[in-house]
């Protein structure tokens, strides 16, 4: 099955004090209740693949906001900040004390929300192999061997998800500030070393790894 605590699709789960929801992706554009700013954002997306993944992310995010915080989709909008991170609007105004993060792949859409900063990432097992191609850019000396990164496709996906989720706390990505900024010490239990320090959790979907990061 791979490292991580099972995460049941379609069910909200509390992880590190955050709420997490994962949904399997459907083909095409899923139906989502959108507000005016979201509708305008979608209208500016001409590419079908981008539109479908964006809608999948909005749907899982709005379902999470409804089920975990009692905020129905018709009252909420998820719009990007200047950094690109999602911001939650309720009745058209920014919702203080509510932080949302979204991740999606070809197979899954995942959202996490909390009262303060939270990062989430999902990586399909079939995509975990990409980490081997850029290993020199991703791993610090001895890191891959120490955490068993290449033990399986599931472990490779887990490492990638942990690094990406951790980097989202920095509002960055794998290449900025760089994946080496997050050193994966262990997968079972999940432990990372980073500055600033953070807590992480590792979850398993049937065909993907999900990681959640929080401030200490």
Image (cartoon, helix red, strand yellow):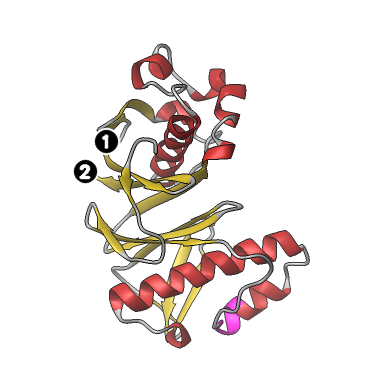
Q: Of marks 1 and 2, which one's residue comes earlier in the chain?
A: 1
Q: Which residue is drawn at the image coordinates 32% and 49% (left, top)?
A: 6
Q: Is residue 123 above or below residue 23?
A: above
Magenta residue span: 34-38
Q: Is mark 2 on a helix, strand or loop?
A: loop
The quarter of the picture where residue 187 lies is top left
Other-residue count near label 2 (Cα within 10 Å), few / some / many at <14 / 14–19 / ≥20: few
Instruction: Report if residue 82 is visible in the image.
Output: yes
Q: Which residue is drawn at the image coordinates 53% and 64% (left, top)?
A: 57
The residue closer to the viewer here, 123 or 71, is 123
Q: Which residue is drawn at the image coordinates 41% and 51% (left, top)?
A: 120
Q: What element carries label 1?
A: loop
- Give the x, y percent position of residue 66: 36, 78
The residue closer to the viewer here, 26 or 102, is 26
Give the residue pinned by disc 1: 197
Give the residue pinned by disc 2: 216
How far is the residue under mark 1 from the one under mark 2?
6 Å
Q: In this view, does 24 lie above or below 148?
A: below
Q: What count of labels does the image hold?
A: 2
The residue closer to the viewer here, 12 or 205, is 205
- Give the x, y percent position of residue 158: 42, 36
């Amino acid at each position: 099955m791979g490292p991580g605590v099972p995460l049941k699709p379609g069910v909200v789960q509390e992880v590190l004090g955050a709420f997490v929801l994962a949904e399997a992706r459907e083909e095409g554009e899923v139906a989502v209740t959108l507000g005016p700013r979201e509708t305008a954002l979608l209208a500016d997306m001409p590419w079908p693949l981008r539109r479908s993944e964006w809608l999948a992310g909005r749907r899982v995010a709005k379902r999470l906001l409804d089920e975990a915080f009692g905020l129905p989709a018709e009252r909420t909008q998820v719009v990007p900040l200047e950094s690109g991170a999602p911001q939650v609007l309720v009745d058209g105004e920014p919702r203080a004390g509510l932080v949302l993060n979204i991740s999606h792949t070809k197979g899954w859409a995942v959202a996490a929300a909390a009262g303060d900063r939270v990062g989430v990432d999902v990586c399909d097992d079939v995509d975990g192999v990409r980490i081997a191609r850029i290993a020199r850019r991703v791993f610090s000396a001895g890191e891959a061997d120490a955490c068993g990164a290449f033990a399986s496709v599931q472990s490779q996906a887990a490492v990638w998800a942990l690094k990406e989720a951790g980097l989202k706390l920095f509002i960055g990505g794998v290449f900025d500030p760089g994946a080496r900024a997050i050193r994966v010490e262990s997968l079972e239990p999940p432990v990372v070393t980073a500055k600033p320090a953070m807590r992480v959790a590792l979850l398993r979907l049937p065909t993907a790894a999900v990681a959640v990061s929080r401030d200490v």
